Amino acid sequence: MRGRDRRVDLGRWRPGERARRYGATTAAIAALTALLVPLRDHLSALNIGFLYLLLVVLIAARWGWGPARFASVAANLAFNYFFQEPLYQLDVRDLGNVLELLVFLSVAALTSALLARARAGEAAARRRERETRVLYELSRLIITETDRTAVLSAICHQVRDTFGAQSCDVLLRDGESLTPVAWSGAAQRPLGTVDERQAAERALHEARPVSLGGRPGRGVPRIVGLRGRQAPIVYLPMRVGGQTIGLLRVTGRVDAQDITDDEMRLLQAFADQAALAADRARLLHEAAQAEALQEASRLKSALLATVSHDLRTPLAAIKASVSSLLEPGMSWEPDTQRELLAAVNEETDRLTRLVSDLLDLSRIEGGALRPELDWYDVAELVETVVARMEPVARAHRLEVDVAPDTGAARLDYVQIGQVIANLIENAAKYAPAGTAIRVSARRRDGAIEVSVTDQGPGIPRTERERVFETFYRAPHAGRAAGTGLGLAICKGLVEAHGGQIWVDDAPGGGARFAFTLPVPTPVPIAGQESVAAR
């Protein structure tokens, strides 16, 4: 929508246009007279009159009633002076000459009126089509663009392109003051002079356009000066739901003329679009805040439910074991004491993991968890984590399948180790005892893909996105222990490395959790960089 070809033609005079039209009319009458004088002995007076009449019609069609009226008088005088007896004398007393002038004027007036009406209708149709196109494109922009500043800036650009204005800016109410939030052209102070402040206050309180340096609703060209300014200003109210939320300020050109009704109507349409855009941005912001509050409330409820359950269970076990050991008069066998202390140790580890998961999740959501990247051998990392998780998955067969060309990846050893460990622990919760849990790694599509496959019940397609949400536990989870944090932590850690994580069906049944790690080039040869576990 940029460029002069998109400006709305409102049919206004340009400076000097009137003089050029009347000068061209005079030249046309003179040229036709000079052409016909040598031929007057060969042409009848009727033919010469028709030629003059044709010229008057053409002038009326091209420039309207004013030049046509002038041409009618000039043609009648030229016809009387050069082509009627006595030659080279003006005789306007003859009734025939008066009738000729009346015919010329009547034809010029009728032609001008008909053609002017046709031109006005055509120009109005073109103007409405252009205005509709401009407003339609702005409406599409408002619908598709969510950034308030971008939309309002685009509206300001449209106003400048359409009217050739020096500048346009949007002033939104901020308490008792007006603050510029978007502009096109030279950025201005909120309200520069006393006149501007008074005009802005009138536009706000009266909810109507206010013009400085011009008179709205007039079509007569007029250049009006303003103290301390070389161009007129228009303030248009931006109203939504009966309230004025701001102003659209348009500063015209130095040679700007009065603002016509058509221009004011289109300018107000721009102001209405700007108001809708600003209000939509406000509604989107409030909706986002409401959604965030709702999500925070859900997370708080889920956190309280999870923590209350997962704290109560280990604390109850610890309390029971310690109370038994401290019970007066009881003498426990060494094996029994060891069992009670092992239970305390196991439940303490469970509490430690819960607190660690909550802290990790907090750092992930707060953006404070930054990977400490270095080059590590993926096969060594996988084997180390699998060996560490054997006690957790002792009821299952842990299998390792790392392709020979997997090589090294740039990663945080502790964080990616935690991801693999969480996936193994998750598989061990849901897969039947005695089944295999396979940990695989291989290069694929410029990245390293690590996967953990189990032979459990699998995950329905409708649940595959939600299993990575915080505190979410699938309906098929049943009574399996868990906080709903492990997979959410995996997702946060993988995405912090620039990778992706997903779940799909495993061949032969079960679930396959996989994630990718990007491999930047060039990849160092194993052994030349740090690949040892830390």
Image (cartoon, grey):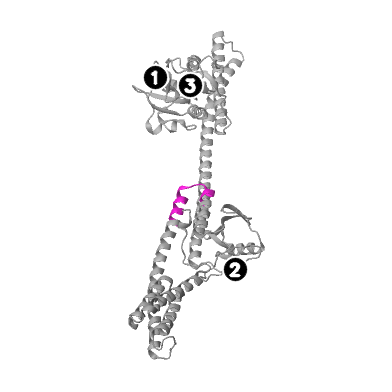
State the extent of the magenta-drawn residues as a range: 135-151
Residue 432: which numbered mark, if any? 1
How far is disc 3 from disc 2 in space, using C-alphas?
76 Å
- From the top left corner, tell me how far across and down residue 243 is, in percent: 54, 59
The amino acid on which the numbered mark 1 sits, given as a three-letter code, is Pro
How far is disc 2 from disc 1 in space, using C-alphas?
88 Å
- From the top left corner, tell me how far across and down residue 286 is, in percent: 53, 47
The amino acid on which the numbered mark 3 sits, given as a three-letter code, is Ile
| Pointers 2 and 1 in contact (C-beta within 8 Å) | no
How far is disc 1 from disc 3 in space, using C-alphas?
20 Å
* Of callouts 1 and 3, the N-terminal one: 3
- From the top left corner, tell me how far across and down residue 59 is, in percent: 41, 73
Q: Quadrant of the C terminus?
A: top right
Residue 256: which numbered mark, if any? none
What residue appears at the point 61 percent right and 13 percent down from the top-left corner? 329
Q: Secondary structure at mark 2?
A: loop
Q: Quadrant of residue 322?
A: top right
The amino acid on which the numbered mark 2 sits, given as a three-letter code, is Val
Task: Report crowding for label 1: few under 14, some 14 to 19, many 20 or more residues within 10 A (C-alpha).
Answer: some
Mark 2 sits on what residue?
224
- 400 or 138, which is in the foreground? 138
Task: Report crowding for label 3: few under 14, some 14 to 19, many 20 or more residues within 10 A (C-alpha).
Answer: many
Mark 3 sits on what residue?
420
- 381 or 12, which is in the foreground? 12
- 519 or 351, which is in the foreground? 519
* Of callouts 3 and 2, the N-terminal one: 2
